[in-house]
Image (cartoon, rainbow, N blue to C red):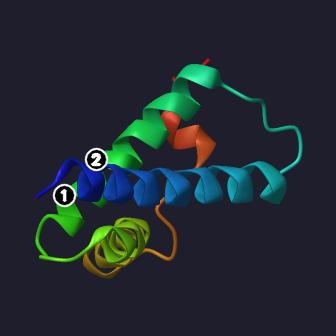
Amino acid sequence: MTILIIIAAFGGGAVRGMVGFIKHQFSYKNVGFNLPYFLAMLFISGIVGVLVASAFNVNAVFAFIIGYAGGDFLENVYKIIAKKKEIYFPLKDVLPPK
């Protein structure tokens, strides 16, 4: 796998992460921006894009597309296995009790 394909796949995954983050920001009111969380999600999405694209022997354009679609694929597999409609946890389940 060449460096161009790795960069394209990472870019596709990162774009997918950015789209998901922006969608989440505009779906709810009063959602704050957390820079470390945002950067971590972009990095994780990029790594997922590289891992999914590495399963195929393609050029850089298809690596970008596969990197973008890889996150959606994994998200939908999780939804099917966990039998949930969304992957987000309710805030009450994440925050410690007061």
Q: CA distance from mark 2 to mark 1?
A: 6 Å
* Relative to 68, residue 56 above or below: below
Residue 8 visible, this orientation: yes
Write the residue at 47% across / 41% down. Answer: 42
Q: Tell which of 48 and 79 is nearer to you.
A: 48
* Amino acid type, mark 1: Leu
Relative to the observer, which residue lies in front, 82 or 18? 18
Q: Residue shown at 25%/77% (left/top)?
A: 81
SS at circle 2 = helix
Q: Which residue is mark 2?
A: 47
Would you call the spot at circle 1 few (<14 residues within 10 Å), some (14-19), or many (20 or more)?
some
Q: Which residue is mark 1?
A: 51
Q: Are marks 2 and 1 in contact (CB under 8 Å)?
A: yes
Number of marks: 2
Q: Quadrant of the C terminus?
A: top right
Say whether residue 88 is visible: no
Amino acid beneath label 2: Ile
Q: Quadrant of residue 78?
A: bottom left
Q: Position of residue 26 (x, y in %)?
A: 83, 55
Give the secondary structure at mark 1: helix
Name the residue: 63% across, 50% down: 21
Q: Is residue 95 above or below residue 31?
A: above
What mark, if any, has residue 84 been given in the picture? none
Density class for disc 2 (Cα within 10 Å; few <14, some 14-19, many ≥20) is: many
Q: Which residue occupies the foreground of this view, 43 or 8?
A: 8
Residue 69 coordinates in the image, percent (x, y) = 40, 74
Judge left or right: residue 17 versus residue 72: right
In the rendered image, residue 49, in percent from the top left (x then y), is placed at 31, 59
- Image quadrant holding the N terminus, namely bottom left
Q: Residue at x 66, y 25 (%)?
A: 34
